[in-house]
Image (cartoon, coloured by chain):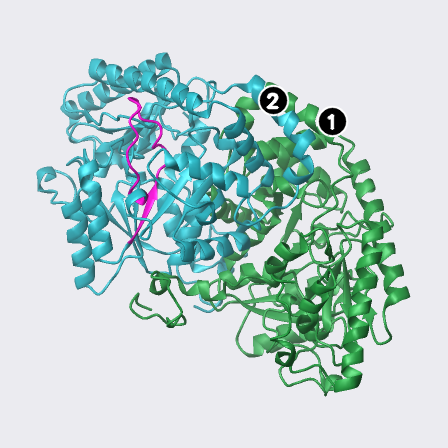
Chain colours: A green, B cyan
Amino acid sequence: MTPDQPGHQQPTHRDLDPHLRRYAQRTAGMTASEIRALFAVASRPEVVSLAGGMPYLPALPLDSLADELAQLIMTDGMTALQYGSAQGTPELRERICEVMALEGIRAHPDDVTVTVGSQMALDMVTRIFCDPGDVVLAEAPSYVGALSTFASYQAQVVQVPMDDDGVIPAELDAMLRSLRAQGRTPKFFYTIPNFHNPAGVTLAVARRADVQQSCAEHQVLIVEDNPYGLLSFDGQIYPAMRATDPDNVVYLGSFSKTFAPGLRVGWALAPHAVREKLVLAAESATLCPPTFTQFVVSRYLAQHDWKGQIKHYREAYRERRDAMLAALAQHMPPGCRWTHPAGGFYVWFTVPEGLDTKAMLPRAVTQRVAYVPGTAFYADSHNPPGRDNSSDSDNPPGDDNSPGDTAPAGRLMRLSFCYPTPERITEGVRRLAAVLERELELQRTFGSVRPRTMFGPQSPSPDTA
Amino acid sequence: MTPDQPGHQQPTHRDLDPHLRRYAQRTAGMTASEIRALFAVASRPEVVSLAGGMPYLPALPLDSLADELAQLIMTDGMTALQYGSAQGTPELRERICEVMALEGIRAHPDDVTVTVGSQMALDMVTRIFCDPGDVVLAEAPSYVGALSTFASYQAQVVQVPMDDDGVIPAELDAMLRSLRAQGRTPKFFYTIPNFHNPAGVTLAVARRADVQQSCAEHQVLIVEDNPYGLLSFDGQIYPAMRATDPDNVVYLGSFSKTFAPGLRVGWALAPHAVREKLVLAAESATLCPPTFTQFVVSRYLAQHDWKGQIKHYREAYRERRDAMLAALAQHMPPGCRWTHPAGGFYVWFTVPEGLDTKAMLPRAVTQRVAYVPGTAFYADSHNPPGRDNSSDSDNPPGDDNSPGDTAPAGRLMRLSFCYPTPERITEGVRRLAAVLERELELQRTFGSVRPRTMFGPQSPSPDTA
């Protein structure tokens, strides 16, 4: 496309951006996520936000952290405040290998690349593998941040159904065969095996070998994103797929949920040749990850009982999960369903037939409770791959199936229990249940609430609620 | 290209990477920079490195920084360790506007996007503007990190000649016309107006309006990269191009040289519509920049005499620049030339005719001095755009002109005076002069040292020297 052909972005009379014709084609895939728009609303104190994915931090030992940071500056300040290598500090890469050993991974620090959160690892993996139009496989639903990264590289995301035991191996295999029949080889399969965001489910151990075998057979790399793996409520740690498959898995890890997200320290563990490319890509992206935050994490891991801290987190999140599940059971009207996560941050929730979680969000916010509508977790909620949706024949054409459930994305929402207190979670669920009751009452009186535009003009927008 | 067509990457018998056929086409442009390969060598204590661009940090007040960090954790730890917005914290964006005001920029914090160093800002700007094959204009020579970012987005870099007063407006205008005649509009002109890396020159104030007018006339955005602007040795601060042209300039700034690079805090100031795209791109790249390092910078700016600290830096670098210029004048053989920077970190140095800075680097390292060969700063040192090179008719075809000089890139090198002490700089220059004397002696005895392979087998590689 020459710069004189505006392509996908046709200027309109309302468009005042003089740079419009200059943007790269990939910007068409860059749109504000629903989660992002919600941050502003959900941060108001009167709203119980079951929307965000912010970890609960009051469990952190600030006193000793403050002392350690002061020491760090005094003893290692000159190095910690200086440029470092694009791959990350050797000491942190060694510590990361110790962390991964808990999941059965035996890795060499040379194969670890430290990144600015695992989001950057995802960005770098997509950068080195995906040309525009390349296929990436992901679970349906999938992490919204991954979908936006894939979109920014103009990859085509094909989502594979899940159930309560994670992605369904037969569906994955069928998808791989179908793509092969079309002459297409996906660049990788992106999966969150443990305590899935947003689905709250875990890939059954018995399924992991099947998934790995299908991918190996079709020569498709696995990108195993595991930010929540150490946050199981019963202390169980699932074996990483990388542990048994070092040559075909790129493993992504993060300290955002086991220590603190504001440091933005994550990593990728990759086969050696891939790692070389990752480092070159990372170097052109940021020169090097912040040396200082790497030193903070290294020192924290060296001087703290970090496993004890993770235990604190696990207990805090279990208490919150319990509060959410109890409140859901107590308050929700018939026809609702939800997952029962054994770890992590999220419950995946299905509202009764005929309701639409996206349409009712403004009314929920008016009632001071927020969540993320299910459509955010699908690359294309109008043309998703998926299972037969005949059971939802009353839905308008184009609504999709939600794997892990037979409901369409429009009937789904993500409920986070990570950040609010158990009391606030209970209150939030109570408010949400009241919103649902009202929606159902409207439905009984006037029929289905669709099309949603019928309520449009009266709905307070998230910014005015 | 389908995944079954390896394209640019033909496997060879030596290639053991099973993922070779899977990489994106852009990985062809990702190669290890010459600077990167040098880091390992130059970090040995016996080598005087005039190669790296690491700032001099011992001027930093570590005692008070340690206290402030401890305080920061105690008072704001819960926020500083949590996720933040993709655009950066409001407080830091306000402080950044105060910093830019020193250069005559009047900006609103809403138009600032905080990034992981200004390298990430460069990456994001390229991401939102450049499709593969798009033209980007840059100075010749240009910052090696920018060239590698442009390459990773498959942009075609066209470099415009400079002289001692920076980029030559007539050359820029001619290039813009020539490209227009070919039906091509560059996406932007990337420039480092002040204390250029690597050329050490500053764009004359009288030229700035011409550059801005040419770019405006041809509807080409200016990307003004200004990491060194506050580091003039006489305290003079040049007016930013952004100050007079808010609609056609994206300004990139950094705290890496005025505070500390290990925090990786930089920013982009962009026209509002561009800023919206930048934030979306940044969100998919890292979710948000590290909250913690942003708090550290905000607190430092609020509680420290940061302008006084910049004055310390300026004096330290002036002392080093003086040491380098004095040593060059005292030790270098006839036929050498070099720039006289009024700020920043770098001297751009030309060796006598017939010598080749890349070929002689291993011999220099053997003599315990390192620099960066000029070829690193050209997107394509074999097919550069440039001025008439007839004055170097003894050079092999394909060698390019070095604007700012009439020498080809092979006769140029970057000498950094930012990091070593003045004494070490003097010693390094003395060693380098001895290397040059020896090269000249060889040349007198055996003729030109080209082709360089004649010395190849005997040359210690940088890794074995």
Q: Name the foreground residue: A148 vs A53.
A: A53
At horizontal 56% and vertical 27% (from top left) the residue drawn is A80
Q: Is residue A335 above or below residue A330?
A: below
In the picture, residue A125 is in which quadrant? bottom right
Residue A64: which disc?
1
Q: Are marks 1 and 2 on the same chain?
A: no
Q: Tell me where residue A385 appears, x and y as whole percent.
A: 63, 76
Task: Identify the magenta region.
Answer: B221-242
Q: Tell me where residue A256 appears, x and y as whole percent.
A: 67, 44
| SS label for mark 2 | helix
In the picture, residue B311 is in which quadrant? top left
Is residue B71 something that shows in the picture?
yes
Q: Are marks 1 and 2 in contact (CB under 8 Å)?
A: no
Q: Which residue is mark 2?
A: B66
Q: Is residue A241 above or below residue A109?
A: below
**Structural distance between the alpha carbons of marks 1 and 2:** 14 Å
> Disc 1: which chain?
A
